[in-house]
Image (cartoon, grey):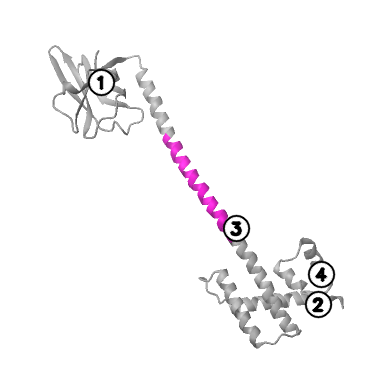
Amino acid sequence: MEAKKHIESGTLELYIAGALSEKENEQVYKLIMEHPEILKEVREIEKSISSLTAHVAPKESKNSFKDILIKMLQEKERTTKVIPLNTSKNNWLTYAGWAATLIIGSTLLLSINKNNNLQAELDTINQAKDQFEIQLEKSNTYLAQNESLLKVIRDKDIVTVPLQGQKVLPEAYAKVYWNKNTKNIYLDVQGLPDPPKGKVYQVWSLKLDPLSPTSLGTIDNFTASKNKVFTISNPNESQAFGITLEPAGGSISPNLEQLYTLGAV
Protein backbone atom coordinates (compact mmCIF):
# COMPACT_ATOMS: atom_id res chain seq x y z
CA MET A 1 0.00 0.00 0.00
CA GLU A 2 2.78 2.42 0.88
CA ALA A 3 4.53 1.81 -2.45
CA LYS A 4 1.28 2.34 -4.39
CA LYS A 5 0.65 5.60 -2.53
CA HIS A 6 4.06 6.95 -3.55
CA ILE A 7 3.64 5.76 -7.14
CA GLU A 8 0.30 7.60 -7.49
CA SER A 9 1.46 10.78 -5.74
CA GLY A 10 3.48 12.18 -8.70
CA THR A 11 6.59 12.48 -6.54
CA LEU A 12 8.51 10.02 -8.69
CA GLU A 13 8.02 12.18 -11.79
CA LEU A 14 9.34 15.24 -9.94
CA TYR A 15 12.27 13.14 -8.69
CA ILE A 16 13.20 12.20 -12.26
CA ALA A 17 12.79 15.82 -13.38
CA GLY A 18 15.18 16.99 -10.67
CA ALA A 19 12.52 19.26 -9.16
CA LEU A 20 12.75 17.98 -5.58
CA SER A 21 14.83 19.31 -2.74
CA GLU A 22 17.93 17.47 -1.60
CA LYS A 23 16.08 16.08 1.41
CA GLU A 24 13.14 14.92 -0.70
CA ASN A 25 15.54 13.30 -3.17
CA GLU A 26 17.10 11.33 -0.31
CA GLN A 27 13.65 10.17 0.84
CA VAL A 28 12.66 8.98 -2.64
CA TYR A 29 16.01 7.27 -3.12
CA LYS A 30 15.48 5.40 0.13
CA LEU A 31 12.02 4.26 -1.02
CA ILE A 32 13.48 3.05 -4.32
CA MET A 33 16.02 0.98 -2.45
CA GLU A 34 13.34 -0.50 -0.16
CA HIS A 35 10.56 -1.18 -2.74
CA PRO A 36 11.37 -2.96 -6.01
CA GLU A 37 7.99 -1.92 -7.42
CA ILE A 38 8.92 1.76 -6.98
CA LEU A 39 12.25 1.15 -8.77
CA LYS A 40 10.32 -0.53 -11.59
CA GLU A 41 7.91 2.45 -11.76
CA VAL A 42 10.84 4.92 -11.95
CA ARG A 43 12.26 3.00 -14.89
CA GLU A 44 8.87 2.98 -16.62
CA ILE A 45 8.53 6.75 -16.16
CA GLU A 46 12.03 7.33 -17.57
CA LYS A 47 11.17 5.13 -20.56
CA SER A 48 7.91 7.10 -21.13
CA ILE A 49 9.73 10.44 -21.03
CA SER A 50 12.39 9.21 -23.47
CA SER A 51 9.74 7.95 -25.89
CA LEU A 52 7.74 11.15 -25.58
CA THR A 53 10.78 13.35 -26.19
CA ALA A 54 11.89 11.26 -29.16
CA HIS A 55 8.37 11.45 -30.63
CA VAL A 56 8.04 15.19 -30.29
CA ALA A 57 11.66 16.03 -31.20
CA PRO A 58 13.09 13.87 -34.00
CA LYS A 59 16.87 13.56 -34.15
CA GLU A 60 17.59 16.79 -36.02
CA SER A 61 20.75 18.49 -34.81
CA LYS A 62 19.57 21.85 -36.16
CA ASN A 63 16.65 21.99 -33.68
CA SER A 64 17.34 23.93 -30.51
CA PHE A 65 15.92 22.77 -27.20
CA LYS A 66 13.56 25.73 -27.30
CA ASP A 67 12.14 24.48 -30.61
CA ILE A 68 11.67 21.04 -29.07
CA LEU A 69 9.67 22.46 -26.16
CA ILE A 70 7.42 24.42 -28.53
CA LYS A 71 6.72 21.26 -30.50
CA MET A 72 5.99 19.39 -27.28
CA LEU A 73 3.48 22.01 -26.20
CA GLN A 74 1.80 21.91 -29.61
CA GLU A 75 1.66 18.10 -29.44
CA LYS A 76 0.21 18.22 -25.94
CA GLU A 77 -2.56 20.57 -27.08
CA ARG A 78 -3.42 18.23 -29.97
CA THR A 79 -3.47 15.05 -27.88
CA THR A 80 -5.60 16.54 -25.10
CA LYS A 81 -8.38 17.20 -27.65
CA VAL A 82 -8.70 13.52 -28.56
CA ILE A 83 -7.84 11.75 -25.30
CA PRO A 84 -10.40 12.19 -22.52
CA LEU A 85 -9.01 13.02 -19.10
CA ASN A 86 -9.24 10.08 -16.72
CA THR A 87 -7.32 8.64 -13.82
CA SER A 88 -5.87 5.65 -15.65
CA LYS A 89 -2.21 4.94 -15.06
CA ASN A 90 -1.28 5.42 -18.75
CA ASN A 91 -2.82 8.89 -18.95
CA TRP A 92 -1.27 9.85 -15.65
CA LEU A 93 2.10 8.76 -16.94
CA THR A 94 1.58 10.78 -20.13
CA TYR A 95 0.78 14.03 -18.32
CA ALA A 96 3.37 13.40 -15.66
CA GLY A 97 5.84 12.77 -18.46
CA TRP A 98 4.92 16.12 -20.04
CA ALA A 99 5.38 17.88 -16.72
CA ALA A 100 8.70 16.19 -16.08
CA THR A 101 9.96 16.87 -19.59
CA LEU A 102 8.93 20.53 -19.45
CA ILE A 103 10.59 20.95 -16.07
CA ILE A 104 13.78 19.39 -17.43
CA GLY A 105 13.59 21.58 -20.54
CA SER A 106 13.08 24.76 -18.54
CA THR A 107 16.01 23.88 -16.32
CA LEU A 108 18.20 23.21 -19.34
CA LEU A 109 17.16 26.46 -21.03
CA LEU A 110 18.06 28.44 -17.93
CA SER A 111 21.38 26.63 -17.76
CA ILE A 112 22.10 27.28 -21.47
CA ASN A 113 21.23 30.97 -21.10
CA LYS A 114 23.46 31.27 -18.04
CA ASN A 115 26.32 29.52 -19.84
CA ASN A 116 25.92 31.83 -22.86
CA ASN A 117 26.12 34.88 -20.59
CA LEU A 118 29.21 33.49 -18.89
CA GLN A 119 30.80 32.77 -22.29
CA ALA A 120 30.10 36.36 -23.43
CA GLU A 121 31.72 37.70 -20.26
CA LEU A 122 34.67 35.36 -20.76
CA ASP A 123 35.08 36.54 -24.38
CA THR A 124 35.09 40.17 -23.18
CA ILE A 125 37.72 39.37 -20.54
CA ASN A 126 39.86 37.54 -23.11
CA GLN A 127 39.64 40.49 -25.52
CA ALA A 128 40.69 42.89 -22.78
CA LYS A 129 43.54 40.51 -21.86
CA ASP A 130 44.71 40.40 -25.49
CA GLN A 131 44.67 44.20 -25.72
CA PHE A 132 46.58 44.48 -22.47
CA GLU A 133 49.21 42.02 -23.70
CA ILE A 134 49.61 43.99 -26.95
CA GLN A 135 50.05 47.25 -25.02
CA LEU A 136 52.46 45.55 -22.63
CA GLU A 137 54.54 44.24 -25.51
CA LYS A 138 54.65 47.72 -27.08
CA SER A 139 55.67 49.25 -23.74
CA ASN A 140 58.40 46.66 -23.25
CA THR A 141 59.72 47.31 -26.77
CA TYR A 142 59.66 51.08 -26.17
CA LEU A 143 61.44 50.63 -22.83
CA ALA A 144 64.11 48.43 -24.42
CA GLN A 145 64.67 51.02 -27.16
CA ASN A 146 65.05 53.80 -24.61
CA GLU A 147 67.48 51.77 -22.52
CA SER A 148 69.55 51.04 -25.63
CA LEU A 149 69.49 54.73 -26.56
CA LEU A 150 70.60 55.80 -23.09
CA LYS A 151 73.51 53.39 -23.29
CA VAL A 152 74.55 54.92 -26.63
CA ILE A 153 74.39 58.58 -25.66
CA ARG A 154 76.24 57.92 -22.38
CA ASP A 155 79.16 56.40 -24.23
CA LYS A 156 82.46 58.12 -23.32
CA ASP A 157 83.23 58.77 -27.00
CA ILE A 158 80.01 60.65 -27.66
CA VAL A 159 80.31 64.33 -28.66
CA THR A 160 77.27 66.37 -27.60
CA VAL A 161 76.27 69.32 -29.81
CA PRO A 162 73.37 71.54 -28.65
CA LEU A 163 71.37 73.18 -31.49
CA GLN A 164 69.82 76.54 -30.65
CA GLY A 165 66.58 77.99 -32.00
CA GLN A 166 66.92 80.50 -34.84
CA LYS A 167 64.97 83.52 -36.09
CA VAL A 168 62.06 81.55 -37.52
CA LEU A 169 61.38 79.94 -34.09
CA PRO A 170 63.71 81.15 -31.29
CA GLU A 171 62.24 78.77 -28.69
CA ALA A 172 63.09 75.72 -30.80
CA TYR A 173 65.97 73.47 -29.76
CA ALA A 174 67.56 70.12 -30.60
CA LYS A 175 70.64 68.12 -29.67
CA VAL A 176 73.10 65.97 -31.60
CA TYR A 177 74.96 63.05 -30.01
CA TRP A 178 77.82 62.25 -32.40
CA ASN A 179 79.84 59.05 -32.22
CA LYS A 180 82.79 59.58 -34.55
CA ASN A 181 83.86 55.95 -34.20
CA THR A 182 80.60 54.54 -35.56
CA LYS A 183 80.04 57.59 -37.82
CA ASN A 184 76.48 57.96 -36.53
CA ILE A 185 74.64 60.84 -34.94
CA TYR A 186 71.67 60.47 -32.61
CA LEU A 187 69.46 63.49 -33.17
CA ASP A 188 67.04 64.53 -30.41
CA VAL A 189 64.43 66.89 -31.89
CA GLN A 190 61.96 66.92 -29.00
CA GLY A 191 62.18 70.74 -29.06
CA LEU A 192 60.73 71.08 -32.57
CA PRO A 193 57.02 71.34 -33.41
CA ASP A 194 55.34 68.92 -35.82
CA PRO A 195 56.03 70.04 -39.38
CA PRO A 196 53.12 71.44 -41.44
CA LYS A 197 51.47 69.20 -44.01
CA GLY A 198 53.65 68.83 -47.12
CA LYS A 199 56.81 69.82 -45.21
CA VAL A 200 59.64 67.86 -43.58
CA TYR A 201 62.63 68.65 -41.42
CA GLN A 202 65.98 68.17 -43.18
CA VAL A 203 69.26 67.70 -41.32
CA TRP A 204 72.53 69.25 -42.52
CA SER A 205 76.20 68.67 -41.78
CA LEU A 206 78.09 71.96 -42.18
CA LYS A 207 81.62 73.07 -42.81
CA LEU A 208 81.97 76.69 -41.81
CA ASP A 209 84.83 78.09 -43.89
CA PRO A 210 83.66 78.31 -46.53
CA LEU A 211 80.06 77.42 -45.59
CA SER A 212 79.40 74.06 -47.19
CA PRO A 213 76.17 72.15 -46.32
CA THR A 214 75.80 68.39 -46.83
CA SER A 215 72.37 66.82 -46.46
CA LEU A 216 72.05 64.02 -43.92
CA GLY A 217 68.48 63.30 -45.05
CA THR A 218 64.94 64.18 -44.04
CA ILE A 219 63.02 63.16 -40.92
CA ASP A 220 59.98 61.59 -42.60
CA ASN A 221 58.45 59.88 -39.56
CA PHE A 222 58.78 62.84 -37.20
CA THR A 223 55.12 62.85 -36.08
CA ALA A 224 54.90 59.09 -35.58
CA SER A 225 57.96 58.91 -33.35
CA LYS A 226 57.36 58.91 -29.60
CA ASN A 227 60.78 59.78 -28.27
CA LYS A 228 61.75 62.02 -31.22
CA VAL A 229 65.27 60.59 -31.35
CA PHE A 230 66.59 59.54 -34.77
CA THR A 231 69.73 57.66 -35.75
CA ILE A 232 71.44 59.17 -38.81
CA SER A 233 74.62 58.14 -40.61
CA ASN A 234 77.25 60.93 -40.73
CA PRO A 235 80.58 60.09 -42.40
CA ASN A 236 81.44 63.82 -42.73
CA GLU A 237 83.99 65.92 -40.87
CA SER A 238 81.24 68.12 -39.52
CA GLN A 239 81.93 71.48 -37.91
CA ALA A 240 78.27 72.25 -37.24
CA PHE A 241 74.78 70.84 -37.64
CA GLY A 242 71.58 72.55 -38.72
CA ILE A 243 67.90 71.67 -39.26
CA THR A 244 65.69 73.39 -41.83
CA LEU A 245 62.06 73.00 -42.85
CA GLU A 246 61.84 71.90 -46.49
CA PRO A 247 59.19 70.66 -48.97
CA ALA A 248 58.37 66.94 -48.72
CA GLY A 249 61.18 64.96 -50.30
CA GLY A 250 63.86 67.44 -49.20
CA SER A 251 66.00 70.03 -50.99
CA ILE A 252 69.41 70.07 -52.63
CA SER A 253 70.49 73.07 -50.54
CA PRO A 254 69.08 74.38 -47.26
CA ASN A 255 66.45 77.12 -47.15
CA LEU A 256 68.12 79.43 -44.63
CA GLU A 257 64.88 81.40 -44.20
CA GLN A 258 63.47 78.21 -42.66
CA LEU A 259 66.49 77.41 -40.50
CA TYR A 260 65.03 76.18 -37.19
CA THR A 261 68.12 75.14 -35.22
CA LEU A 262 71.89 75.49 -35.56
CA GLY A 263 74.86 74.46 -33.41
CA ALA A 264 78.64 74.31 -33.80
CA VAL A 265 80.70 71.30 -32.71
Secondary structure of residue under mark 2: helix
Q: Which residues are magenta?
A: 113-138
Percent position of residue 169, x then y:
25, 21
CA separation in Å, label 4 and label 3:
35 Å
First in sequence: mark 4 vs mark 1 = 4
In this rendering, which labeled residue sits more in front, label 1 or label 3?
1
First in sequence: mark 3 vs mark 2 = 2
> Label 4 amino acid?
Met
Determine the residue positioned at 26% across, 25% down: 232
> Label 2 amino acid?
Glu
CA separation in Å, label 3 and label 2:
38 Å
Check if mark 4's residue and mark 2's residue have beta carbons within 8 Å.
no
In this rendering, which labeled residue sits more in front, label 3 or label 2?
3
22 horizontally vs 171: left or right: right
Give the residue at mark 4. Answer: 33
Q: Which mark is residue 37?
A: 2
Quadrant occupied by the C terminus = top left
Pick out the residue farthest to the right: 1
Q: Which mark is residue 8?
A: none
First in sequence: mark 1 vs mark 2 = 2
Q: Which mark is residue 114?
A: 3
Near mark 1 (Cα within 10 A), the count class, few <14, some 14-19 or many ≥20, is: some
Percent position of residue 245, x then y:
21, 26
CA separation in Å, label 4 and label 1:
96 Å
